[in-house]
Amino acid sequence: MTYPPEPWHLRGQLYLSVWLLPRARLPELPPGLAERARPILIGGRAVVGTAWVRYESGGVLDYRELLSAVLVSVGARPGVSIVDIWVDSEASRAGGRELWGIPKELAAFEFPDPSQRASAVTVAATTTGGVPVAEARLSAGTRLPGRWPFGFPVTQTLHGRVLGTPVRGSARLRFGAARWHPNPAGPLRYLAGQRPWLTLSLTDFRLVFGRRPGDRHRGA
Protein backbone atom coordinates (compact mmCIF):
# COMPACT_ATOMS: atom_id res chain seq x y z
CA MET A 1 0.00 0.00 0.00
CA THR A 2 1.44 3.36 -1.02
CA TYR A 3 1.05 6.47 1.10
CA PRO A 4 2.43 10.02 1.06
CA PRO A 5 5.92 10.61 2.49
CA GLU A 6 6.18 12.64 5.66
CA PRO A 7 5.33 15.27 6.52
CA TRP A 8 1.63 15.00 5.85
CA HIS A 9 -0.14 18.30 5.23
CA LEU A 10 -3.75 17.84 6.31
CA ARG A 11 -6.84 19.99 6.73
CA GLY A 12 -10.39 19.51 7.93
CA GLN A 13 -12.67 19.56 10.97
CA LEU A 14 -12.06 18.08 14.43
CA TYR A 15 -14.00 17.60 17.64
CA LEU A 16 -11.75 17.09 20.66
CA SER A 17 -13.08 15.84 24.00
CA VAL A 18 -10.84 15.87 27.07
CA TRP A 19 -11.51 13.30 29.80
CA LEU A 20 -10.13 13.03 33.34
CA LEU A 21 -10.13 9.32 34.14
CA PRO A 22 -9.19 7.36 37.24
CA ARG A 23 -5.81 5.83 36.61
CA ALA A 24 -7.28 2.35 37.07
CA ARG A 25 -9.45 2.92 33.97
CA LEU A 26 -6.57 3.88 31.70
CA PRO A 27 -5.98 1.77 28.59
CA GLU A 28 -2.57 0.17 28.17
CA LEU A 29 0.13 2.24 26.52
CA PRO A 30 1.69 0.84 23.33
CA PRO A 31 4.18 -2.03 23.83
CA GLY A 32 7.62 -0.73 24.70
CA LEU A 33 6.32 2.65 25.80
CA ALA A 34 4.83 1.67 29.16
CA GLU A 35 8.35 1.08 30.52
CA ARG A 36 9.52 4.56 29.50
CA ALA A 37 6.47 6.81 29.79
CA ARG A 38 4.16 7.71 32.63
CA PRO A 39 0.69 9.25 32.42
CA ILE A 40 0.47 12.89 33.46
CA LEU A 41 -2.03 13.21 36.30
CA ILE A 42 -4.26 16.14 37.26
CA GLY A 43 -5.73 15.77 40.71
CA GLY A 44 -4.87 12.09 40.63
CA ARG A 45 -6.65 11.56 37.31
CA ALA A 46 -5.16 10.80 33.94
CA VAL A 47 -5.81 13.04 30.93
CA VAL A 48 -7.26 11.32 27.87
CA GLY A 49 -8.16 13.05 24.63
CA THR A 50 -10.56 11.65 22.06
CA ALA A 51 -11.22 13.13 18.66
CA TRP A 52 -13.59 12.70 15.76
CA VAL A 53 -11.80 14.03 12.68
CA ARG A 54 -12.81 14.61 9.10
CA TYR A 55 -9.79 15.24 6.88
CA GLU A 56 -10.88 17.05 3.74
CA SER A 57 -9.65 17.76 0.24
CA GLY A 58 -6.72 20.15 0.07
CA GLY A 59 -4.47 17.89 2.17
CA VAL A 60 -2.44 14.90 1.07
CA LEU A 61 -5.27 12.53 2.06
CA ASP A 62 -8.96 12.86 2.84
CA TYR A 63 -10.56 10.37 5.23
CA ARG A 64 -12.32 10.06 8.58
CA GLU A 65 -10.83 9.13 11.93
CA LEU A 66 -11.62 8.39 15.57
CA LEU A 67 -8.79 8.31 18.09
CA SER A 68 -8.05 8.10 21.80
CA ALA A 69 -4.75 9.34 23.25
CA VAL A 70 -3.19 9.62 26.71
CA LEU A 71 -1.17 12.62 27.91
CA VAL A 72 2.22 11.23 28.96
CA SER A 73 5.74 12.28 29.78
CA VAL A 74 8.98 10.56 28.81
CA GLY A 75 11.52 11.99 31.22
CA ALA A 76 10.73 15.69 31.31
CA ARG A 77 9.20 15.74 27.84
CA PRO A 78 5.38 15.78 27.61
CA GLY A 79 3.50 14.35 24.68
CA VAL A 80 0.43 12.38 23.68
CA SER A 81 0.43 8.66 23.01
CA ILE A 82 -2.27 7.31 20.72
CA VAL A 83 -3.64 4.09 22.20
CA ASP A 84 -6.69 3.49 19.98
CA ILE A 85 -7.32 4.82 16.49
CA TRP A 86 -9.48 3.96 13.50
CA VAL A 87 -9.54 5.36 9.96
CA ASP A 88 -11.42 4.59 6.76
CA SER A 89 -8.35 4.88 4.51
CA GLU A 90 -5.96 2.04 3.71
CA ALA A 91 -3.25 4.55 2.83
CA SER A 92 -3.63 6.36 6.16
CA ARG A 93 -3.54 3.07 8.06
CA ALA A 94 -0.37 1.91 6.33
CA GLY A 95 1.40 5.26 6.57
CA GLY A 96 0.52 5.79 10.22
CA ARG A 97 1.86 2.39 11.18
CA GLU A 98 5.01 2.39 9.06
CA LEU A 99 6.11 6.02 9.43
CA TRP A 100 5.25 6.75 13.06
CA GLY A 101 4.20 3.57 14.88
CA ILE A 102 0.57 4.72 15.22
CA PRO A 103 -1.63 1.62 15.68
CA LYS A 104 -4.29 2.53 13.12
CA GLU A 105 -7.09 0.09 12.38
CA LEU A 106 -9.87 0.28 9.81
CA ALA A 107 -13.44 1.28 10.58
CA ALA A 108 -16.60 2.24 8.78
CA PHE A 109 -17.85 5.70 9.73
CA GLU A 110 -21.13 7.52 9.70
CA PHE A 111 -19.89 11.08 9.93
CA PRO A 112 -21.69 13.15 7.28
CA ASP A 113 -21.14 16.49 8.96
CA PRO A 114 -19.21 17.52 12.11
CA SER A 115 -22.37 18.96 13.68
CA GLN A 116 -24.32 15.73 13.38
CA ARG A 117 -24.19 12.25 14.86
CA ALA A 118 -20.92 10.39 14.38
CA SER A 119 -20.38 6.66 14.71
CA ALA A 120 -17.64 4.14 14.02
CA VAL A 121 -17.70 0.36 13.58
CA THR A 122 -14.52 -1.66 13.23
CA VAL A 123 -13.84 -3.38 9.93
CA ALA A 124 -12.91 -7.03 10.45
CA ALA A 125 -10.54 -8.39 7.84
CA THR A 126 -11.85 -11.94 7.96
CA THR A 127 -15.57 -11.44 8.53
CA THR A 128 -18.39 -9.42 7.07
CA GLY A 129 -19.17 -7.73 10.36
CA GLY A 130 -17.46 -5.48 12.85
CA VAL A 131 -17.62 -4.28 16.44
CA PRO A 132 -19.35 -0.97 17.26
CA VAL A 133 -16.79 1.40 18.77
CA ALA A 134 -18.72 4.52 19.74
CA GLU A 135 -21.38 7.00 18.81
CA ALA A 136 -21.47 10.68 19.67
CA ARG A 137 -23.73 13.66 19.13
CA LEU A 138 -21.54 16.66 18.38
CA SER A 139 -22.35 20.35 18.43
CA ALA A 140 -20.37 23.58 18.26
CA GLY A 141 -20.85 26.56 20.54
CA THR A 142 -19.29 29.97 20.97
CA ARG A 143 -16.58 30.80 18.47
CA LEU A 144 -13.38 32.46 19.65
CA PRO A 145 -11.88 35.15 17.39
CA GLY A 146 -8.93 34.49 15.11
CA ARG A 147 -6.94 31.36 14.37
CA TRP A 148 -5.22 29.52 17.19
CA PRO A 149 -1.84 27.83 16.78
CA PHE A 150 -1.12 24.44 18.31
CA GLY A 151 1.81 22.05 18.49
CA PHE A 152 2.73 18.88 20.36
CA PRO A 153 4.68 15.64 19.89
CA VAL A 154 2.99 12.28 19.33
CA THR A 155 4.94 9.70 21.33
CA GLN A 156 4.85 6.14 20.00
CA THR A 157 7.22 3.19 19.56
CA LEU A 158 8.64 2.27 16.16
CA HIS A 159 11.04 -0.60 15.54
CA GLY A 160 11.70 -0.90 19.27
CA ARG A 161 12.46 2.79 19.79
CA VAL A 162 10.41 5.51 21.44
CA LEU A 163 9.72 8.12 18.79
CA GLY A 164 8.39 11.66 19.21
CA THR A 165 6.73 12.98 16.04
CA PRO A 166 5.96 16.70 15.82
CA VAL A 167 2.49 18.00 15.00
CA ARG A 168 1.90 21.71 14.41
CA GLY A 169 -0.87 23.75 12.88
CA SER A 170 -3.66 26.23 13.47
CA ALA A 171 -7.45 26.22 13.61
CA ARG A 172 -10.51 28.29 14.33
CA LEU A 173 -11.68 27.40 17.80
CA ARG A 174 -15.14 26.93 19.28
CA PHE A 175 -16.32 25.64 22.60
CA GLY A 176 -18.33 22.53 21.83
CA ALA A 177 -20.37 19.74 23.31
CA ALA A 178 -20.32 15.99 22.79
CA ARG A 179 -22.68 13.34 24.11
CA TRP A 180 -20.69 10.13 23.91
CA HIS A 181 -22.01 6.58 23.79
CA PRO A 182 -18.99 4.24 23.72
CA ASN A 183 -19.76 0.56 23.37
CA PRO A 184 -19.32 -0.79 26.94
CA ALA A 185 -18.12 -4.09 25.46
CA GLY A 186 -15.97 -2.47 22.77
CA PRO A 187 -12.40 -1.17 22.55
CA LEU A 188 -13.31 2.20 24.14
CA ARG A 189 -15.06 0.60 27.12
CA TYR A 190 -12.79 2.57 29.49
CA LEU A 191 -14.87 5.65 28.56
CA ALA A 192 -18.22 4.00 29.28
CA GLY A 193 -20.08 5.73 32.10
CA GLN A 194 -17.72 8.74 31.99
CA ARG A 195 -18.32 12.26 30.74
CA PRO A 196 -15.89 14.56 28.96
CA TRP A 197 -14.52 17.37 31.06
CA LEU A 198 -14.23 19.67 28.04
CA THR A 199 -15.06 19.56 24.32
CA LEU A 200 -13.59 21.89 21.72
CA SER A 201 -14.25 22.19 18.02
CA LEU A 202 -11.21 22.88 15.82
CA THR A 203 -12.75 24.02 12.56
CA ASP A 204 -10.95 24.56 9.28
CA PHE A 205 -7.73 23.27 10.82
CA ARG A 206 -4.52 23.03 8.87
CA LEU A 207 -1.73 20.90 10.25
CA VAL A 208 1.61 19.34 9.41
CA PHE A 209 2.19 15.85 10.81
CA GLY A 210 5.78 14.62 10.80
CA ARG A 211 9.20 15.98 10.06
CA ARG A 212 10.09 18.25 7.22
CA PRO A 213 13.18 17.40 5.13
CA GLY A 214 16.22 18.39 7.13
CA ASP A 215 14.52 18.15 10.52
CA ARG A 216 16.54 16.24 13.08
CA HIS A 217 15.13 12.82 13.97
CA ARG A 218 13.81 12.89 17.51
CA GLY A 219 13.87 9.81 19.67
CA ALA A 220 13.16 9.58 23.36
Image: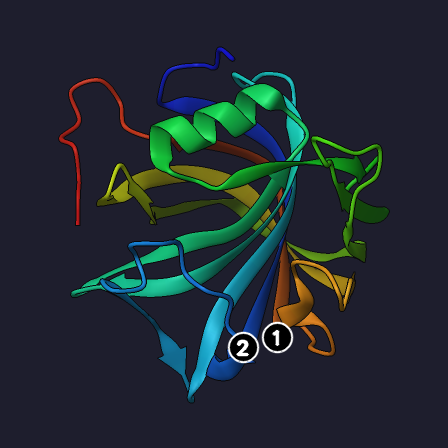
For disc 1, the neighbor class at 10 Å (few under 14, some 14 to 19, many from 20) is: few
Residue located at (27% from left, 28% from top): 211
* Residue underneath mark 2: 20
Q: Residue furthest top?
A: 2
Instruction: Tell me, yes or no, if residue 168 can be seen here.
Output: yes
Q: Please, what secondary structure does the residue beneath circle 1 have?
A: loop
Q: Is residue 82 left or right of residue 13?
A: left
| Up-down relation of residue 160 to residue 94 (above or below) | below
Q: Position of residue 36 (x, y in %)?
A: 22, 62
Q: Is residue 34 left or right of residue 180?
A: left
* Residue underneath mark 1: 197
Q: Position of residue 22 (x, y in %)?
A: 52, 83
| Up-down relation of residue 99 to residue 32 (above or below) | above
Q: Amino acid at mark 1?
A: Trp
Q: Amino acid at mark 2?
A: Leu
Residue located at (69% from left, 75% from top): 195
Q: Nearer the viewer, residue 59 or 150?
A: 59
Q: Determine the image quadrant of residue 38.
A: bottom left
